Every structure is written in structure tokens, then in C-alpha cells.
Image (spheres, helix red, strand yellow):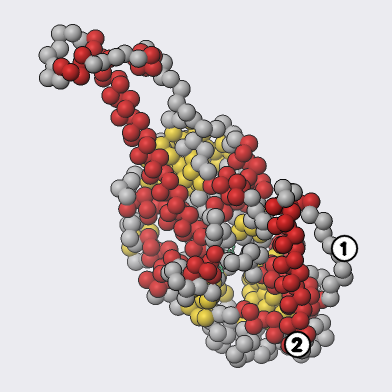
Amino acid sequence: MDSPRRSSVIIIGAGVSGLSAAKVLIENGVEDVVVLEASDRVGGRIRKQDFGGVTVELGAGWIVGVGGKEPNPAWELAEKSNLRTCFSDYSNARFNIYDRSGNLIPSGLAADSYKKAVDSAMEKLRKLEANVCYGGDVSIVTEPPPTQKTPIELAIDFTLHDFEMAEVEPIATYSDFGDQEFLVADERGYEHLLYKMAEDFLFTSEGKILDTRLKLNKVVRELKHSRDGVTVMTEDGCVYEANYVILSVSIGVLQSHLISFSPPLPRWKTEAIEKLDVMVYTKIFLKFPRKFWPCGPGKEFFIYAHERRGYYTFWQHMENAYPGSNILVVTLTNGESKRVEAQSDEETVKEAMGVLKDMFGPNIPEATDILVPRWWNNRFQRGSYSNYPIISNHQVVHDIKAPVGCIFFTGEHTSKKYSGYVHGAYLTGIDTVNDLLEEMGRQDERSSENKTSLSEPLLAMTDSLNLIQNDAVTSLKCDVPTQLYLGGKLPKLCYDY
Ligand SMILES: Cc1cc2nc3c(=O)[nH]c(=O)nc-3n(C[C@H](O)[C@H](O)[C@H](O)COP(=O)(O)OP(=O)(O)OC[C@H]3O[C@@H](n4cnc5c(N)ncnc54)[C@H](O)[C@@H]3O)c2cc1C
């Protein structure tokens, strides 16, 4: 069992935000850091797996926001790691929409439906904004009477709101970093950039992190906190102590109560945590003995229009990333993701094959393999990423991020501008550490002030002392808090719960 040696900071979670936090702490001289990670690997929602002879990304797959005025930090890390990527433009999916009989929807009709969907989303947004301006409640904005949407409209609505991030223009990621997207297509996986980053501040060898400050398979279950620091208990009975904790687990994990807090988190914090939606986003990979889908420019993505919204709607082939791999990827979200997670992979292959036969005819070959990630049922994730309500109150973002005593929060869900993205998570790790370093500085000042006020009255009471600084003694006043301090009763410091 690990002995509870006290560290300066414990970081819980070794995803991109936890690792960027560790990097900034160590680079700033705070070296006695411990990183506790529940799973047997680093990376969290950046995760690769071998499938069908290539490496596929179960979690983050794209570097989003490239080519703009500011460099995207995820892109910089990718360049530094020589990560292989390929340009990817899923906006062309709207020109490849199939109906249930396998007919390609004429591009004019698809473009009209797309415009209608964007206009209706903008109209709804304007109403929400107007209501908020007049002090109304976002949740009670009256919805227009539901009109029966056609399968094409449903498919486009899904693509705009579930496949792409439902964000309000201007989208900070695009306006700050550029509007290009690159798909990671590297056998070493997206996670390679994390190993490369770790080389700068952790002990690594041959691409492996060997630093003893990183502890894998440590599932944190309880945090006991007071103004003196934090005690962290893990599922395997280990106890760790630190002055501060940085908690980088996902919003889904915070909502699931996997970790208990003693004393409990204050109401403003738990309410903010509950307010955030968790998006479930599932990429299902299917391997085939041969290609039967169109390839070539503008054909990487295609859409299936079904009367059930989100039913195997959004498809991608992997020929651009891995030519000859014969792999298709279909993306499900939320309710459909949870439904598919709960059923067997055989049932899922059957459903997906039914959809592909609708689009490409009955003579296509059967899939030889399937991979279904289960982000919702993974107790260390409980979903894919946070989804702030379209018009969100700035207070919610503030409260999600705000520290509680010695516990600091980080992770993609704490990002004001880039929640849901790898670069968002990376930048929050840095932001949180900057806040923590400021707090540590203030704490040092408080300690040295306390030391001064402790020594002054002691000197005042020692009249036989031969002092060099006579002035200091004559000007001494023993004020009330100092007397209490000497009597062992420390005046209660402000501990904001
Ligand atoms: C399917 C999917 C697709 C995505 N696609 C993209 C994309 O294309 N582009 C993009 O930019 N972003 C994408 N994202 C989002 C991106 O992956 C995340 O925003 C980012 O990786 C989150 O990093 P994080 O450090 O905040 O959290 P995480 O990566 O979740 O790290 C938190 C860590 O905490 C650990 N943990 C949890 N509970 C405990 C516990 N009790 N004790 C100890 N450790 C614990 C977890 O195991 C995990 O390693 C996608 C995510 C998913 C799931």
C-alpha cells in the first residue's frame, strides 16, 4: 500500500487536460506532483485501437480549427509529433444523401433542405436570445408547433446538431484557429502527441511513460478536504495527501457520483454540474472484404435519410486515411448510442447491414468485423463530451470551473470557448494551473505574514533580548488576532464553501 506522503498537488485523471496541467506545474518548479489515473493508460477520450489491420480512433479523431490567425495548440503538438493527418471536409456530406431506396437526393433539394434547417435553427436562436434579453427563462420559450419533418430534413437536422457541434456563430474554435479540419490517420494514434508532450516533463523511455509520479489503475473514490489540504482515497485502498487537488474527470463522471466529497460539494457547484448536458457520440467501425461505396473527391462522407432521426445517419469511408482498408464508420449519438451500447454487436451489425443494403442494394458483402465503443457505459467517462445549452448563462461556466477550497477543476467541460474539443481540454489544464499557482502564491504570502505576526509578540515578551532592530520592538503592538494565535486559537481563515 502506498504511504500517504504529502505532495503539493494531486492531479486526478491523465487525459489531455490532466497531462497539460502536470506539464505546466512541473515546468513552474512544482515537481512533487502525483497523477492518479483510473484506467491502465493515459489519454482518456483520446484513444486508439487496432481494427481491421489499421489504427482507428474511438474518441477524438479530428484536429478541429486549423489554418487561422492563431495556432491551434493541438495542431502544434501534432506537428511536433509528426502525426500523420489528412484534410477532411464533412460539409460535402450534404451532397451525398441517400433515401431508403438507395436514390441519391438531387443536390438542389438537399441544398434547400439544408438552408431551411439552418434558417429554422437561427430563428429559434433569435427567439431564445430575445427572451433572455427581456429577462425570460430559456427553458420556457414556446416551441413552434411541431411540423412533420421529412427523412431528409431529419437527416440534415441530425448532421447539423448532433454530428457537428451545435455551437452558436461565431464559433470560437473556427474564428480563433481557422476553419479547416484534419483527420488523424497515424498508426501511433492521436494519443502519440500526448506521449511526445510527456517527454518534455516526465521520465519516458522508448515512447513509454515510466515516471513514478504517474500512477495508473488508481480509481479515486473519495476526496476529504479541509483548509489544510486534501486526502484522496482510491478503490484499491490507497491513501494520498496533498495541499491541492486538480480534478480533471469528465462532466459525466462528476454527475455519476463515482467520487464522493467530504464535506459534500456546495450547492452552487452541484447545481452547475447537473445543468450541463452530456453528449454521447459513438463511432461504429465496420470492416468489409471489398469496397462497394463511391470513393473519390467529395465522397468521403454520406448520409442516410430515414424517418427515425439519427438512425445510422452519418457515414464515412476510411479510404482517404487508410487506402485499401475497406472500413466504414457510422456515427450515432445520444439515445441511439445508448440503445446500441445496450445490445449485442451482432444485432448492431444486422441493423447497419440493413441500412447499407437500403443504400447500395442487396448484393453487397457482409461485414467481417465490427467495433462498437461504449463511452456511455464506461464508468470513467459516462459520455463523450459536455454540451452547454445553446444560450448558456455565463454563471454556469464560471461555477463549473470555480475551485472549492483546495480542489481545482479542469477538463474540456470547464472551457469557456472550446468545450468538447481536444484543444479546449489542453488549454483548460494550463488555465487551471495558472489559477492554482496564483493561489499558491497568495498562500505563501499568508503563511509568511502569519510567521511574522507569530514572531513579533514573542519578541515583545522577551525583554532581555539584545536586539539589533530596536525600532521593530518599540513599534510592536499585540493585536487581538495575534493574541488568539498565540493562544492556539487561530482565527478562522476564509474558506469559501
Ligand atoms: C467519441 C468522441 C469523439 C470526439 N471527437 C473529437 C474530435 O474529433 N476532435 C476534438 O477536438 N475532440 C473530440 N472529442 C473530445 C475530446 O476527446 C475531449 O474533449 C478531450 O479528450 C477531453 O480531455 P479531458 O482531459 O478533459 O478528459 P478525459 O480525456 O476524459 O480525461 C479524464 C481522465 O480521468 C480519468 N478518470 C475518470 N474517473 C477517474 C477516477 N475516479 N479516478 C482517476 N481517474 C479517473 C479517465 O480515465 C480519463 O483518463 C471526442 C470525444 C469522444 C468521446
Q: Indicate the position of residue 200 as horizontal and vertical percent values.
A: 33, 60
Q: Quadrant of the N terminus?
A: top left
The residue at label 1 has a CB less than 8 Å from ligand 1? no
When asked about the image quadrant of residue 361, the answer is: bottom right
Which residue lies at the image location 73% right of the left edge and 83% below the top edge? 111
> 87 or 113: nearer the eye?
113
The residue type indicated by label 2 comes to Gly
Which residue lies at the image location 32% right of the left edge and 27% below the top edge? 449
Q: Residues within 10 Å of mark 2 (few under 14, many from 20)?
A: few
User: Is 216 displayed left or right of 121 in the figure?
Assistant: left
Question: For mark 1, what is the residue?
Answer: 145
Question: For mark 2, what is the residue?
Answer: 108
Q: Is label 1 in a helix, a strand or a loop?
A: loop
- The quadrant where ligand 1 appears is bottom right
Q: Residues within 10 Å of mark 1 (few under 14, many from 20)?
A: few
Which residue lies at the image location 47% right of the left edge and 73% below the top edge? 68
Q: Quadrant of the C terminus?
A: top right
Q: Indicate the position of residue 342 as horizontal and vertical percent values.
A: 73, 60
Disc 1/disc 2 C-alpha distance (Å): 27 Å
